[in-house]
Image (tube, helix red, strand yellow):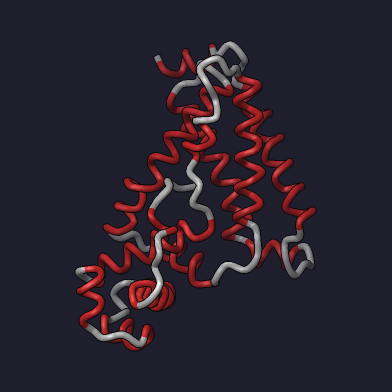
Amino acid sequence: MVQESDINEDLSGTKRALIEAGGELFAHHGLEGVSIRMIAEKANANVTAVNYYFGSKENLYYEALKYATLATDDRPVQHYLAELDGQAGPQEALAVLERLITEKTSIYLAEGEPEWHMRLVMRSLIDPTPQLRRLVDELFRPDFEALCALLDRCRPGMSPEEQARMAFAVMGMIFFYITVRHPILMLLNRKAFDGEFVRQVAETICRTVTAGLDSMGRDGSRGRRESR
C-alpha cells in the first residue's frame, strides 16, 4: 500500500526502457551486482543515458523500485480516508476499510504482473539499502499513517500502538498471499488465484480484522489503558 506518485507519467522511450531493464537486472543480481553498462546494453541505450536521466545507478535503482511498487497499485490509502467526512461514524469507517481490503486484495492477487516487480521488492526487503529507507519514508509511511487513522475511525480510542499492530495485521494478511503465492498454489493444487478464491480471501481478512477491532472494546478503554 503506497502513496500516489508520478508513476503514471509518460515514461515512454529511453527513460522507461532504462527503468525496466535496470529493474529486471537489479531483481536478479542486486544493486551491487549490476553495472551501468549492463543496464544500457539491456535497454539498447547509451551508457551516458543513465546519468542523463537519473544521475547515478543508485537513483535508477530507487526509480525502478518505486516503479515496481506502484505499477500494481497507485491508489493511496489517503483516498479511502478522504471519503469519510467529519460526521462519519465507526460503521461508515468500517465499510470503507472493508472495501479497501477487498480492492487491495483483488489488485495484488491478480495475475499478469511482470515477475521482476515482486522479485525486486522482495530483494529490497531482505537486503535493505538506503533506497528502501527512501521508499519507506516517501511512499509507505504516508499510507501507513493513513491506514492507522482509518482504523482509529473504525474503533475510536485505540492507542497508537494498537493502531500500528492492526495496520500491520491488515497489510500482513494481504501480502502473505503475494509473497507465498507459489507454495499456496502448490498446497491447494491450483495454477492461479481465480476470482472466487480472491473474493473469499478478502472476506476472510475482513472478518478477521473486524473481530480484532471488536475484541478491543467499543469504548476504547483497552487502548486508553495501554497508552498510559
Can residue 85 be seen? Answer: yes
| Residue 215 in picture, x, y percent from top left | 64, 22
Q: Is residue 51 left or right of residue 116?
A: left
Can residue 124 be seen? Answer: no
Q: Residue at x 47, y 13 (%)?
A: 225
Q: Residue at x 42, y 18 (%)?
A: 227
Q: Is residue 135 left or right of residue 112?
A: left
Q: Residue at x 64, y 49 (%)?
A: 105
Q: Residue at x 39, y 51 (%)?
A: 5
Depth check: 34 or 72 in front?
Answer: 72
Vertical position of residue 57 compared to residue 67: above or below: below
| Residue 193 in picture, x, y percent from top left | 72, 61
| Residue 151 in picture, x, y percent from top left | 54, 28
Marks counted in the figure total 0
Vertical position of residue 13 compared to residue 101: above or below: below
Work out which quarter of the rendered image holds the C terminus and state it: top left
Vertical position of residue 25 compared to residue 211: above or below: below
Depth check: 206 or 103 in front?
Answer: 103
Q: Is residue 89 left or right of residue 38?
A: right
| Residue 122 in picture, x, y percent from top left | 46, 62
Depth check: 195 or 32 in front?
Answer: 195
